[in-house]
Image (cartoon, rainbow, N blue to C red):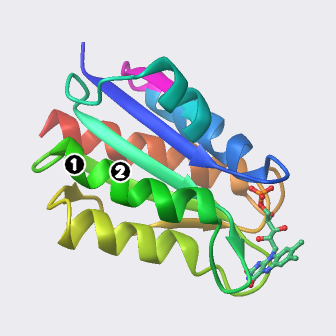
Amino acid sequence: MAKALVLYATRTNETKKIAELIAEGMRMRALEVDVYSIGEYESKKVDPQPYDAVLLGAATYHGDMIPTMKTFLFTLEKANLEGKVGGAFGAFGWSGEAPDRIFDTMRHIYKMDMISAPLRLRSASLGGGIQMAHEYGAEIAGKIAK
Ligand SMILES: Cc1cc2nc3c(=O)[nH]c(=O)nc-3n(C[C@H](O)[C@H](O)[C@H](O)COP(=O)(O)O)c2cc1C
């Protein structure tokens, strides 16, 4: 069974909720999914290599990604994710820079096989957020299957 890893950095848990909804969308398409905060990922010493897809999510604060994710992107550079399917997401209030910047790092530095675009949501549950997050998970599953 194909596997996906979803990692997130959040302050008030909106990005965590989005991570869990994306994971639901992937599980509906028969993927095995693990979801961790960056802290959990590091304390469990998770090996990213067995995963077919890796998704990173971070909230936007002060026009940038939350600092935990900024530091973590340097850590993950060493993990050799080249060729794995990738996606990026995050909660935001008005400008939402984080998902785009993470997405670009995954594409240009990690050389991952990125899906069409990052997912930016003002809320996990309002304005069609649940459906959009499920669809994002489905798109990841579809790309792994190709
Ligand atoms: C001090 C502060 C600064 C923020 N700066 C931004 C910002 O520059 N751009 C933006 O889109 N949202 C900004 N937000 C809104 C958060 O991104 C939004 O509340 C988001 O849902 C938080 O996600 P989280 O629960 O995953 O931390 C800011 C919120 C706070 C409290």
Left or right placement of residue 129 versus residue 12 in this view: left
Between 129 and 66, the one lying in front of the other is: 66
The answer to whether 19 is drawn above or below residue 87 in the figure is above
Marks 2 and 1 close (CB-CB < 8 Å)? yes
Q: Check if residue 28 falls in the magenta segment.
A: yes
Q: Residues within 10 Å of mark 1 (few under 14, many from 20)?
A: few
Residue 129, x across and y down, in percent: 71, 55
Residue 68, x across and y down, in percent: 60, 56
Q: Which mark is residue 75?
A: 2
Residue 123, x across and y down, in percent: 79, 60
The answer to whether 54 is drawn above or below residue 123 in the figure is above
Between 121 and 51, the one lying in front of the other is: 51
Q: Amino acid at mark 1?
A: Lys
Q: Which residue is mark 1?
A: 78
Taking the spot 37% from the left edge, 18% from the top edge, the residue there is 30
Q: Amino acid at mark 2?
A: Thr
Q: Residues within 10 Å of mark 2 (few under 14, many from 20)?
A: few
Residue 14, x across and y down, in percent: 78, 51
**Which stretch did the figure color magenta?**
27-34
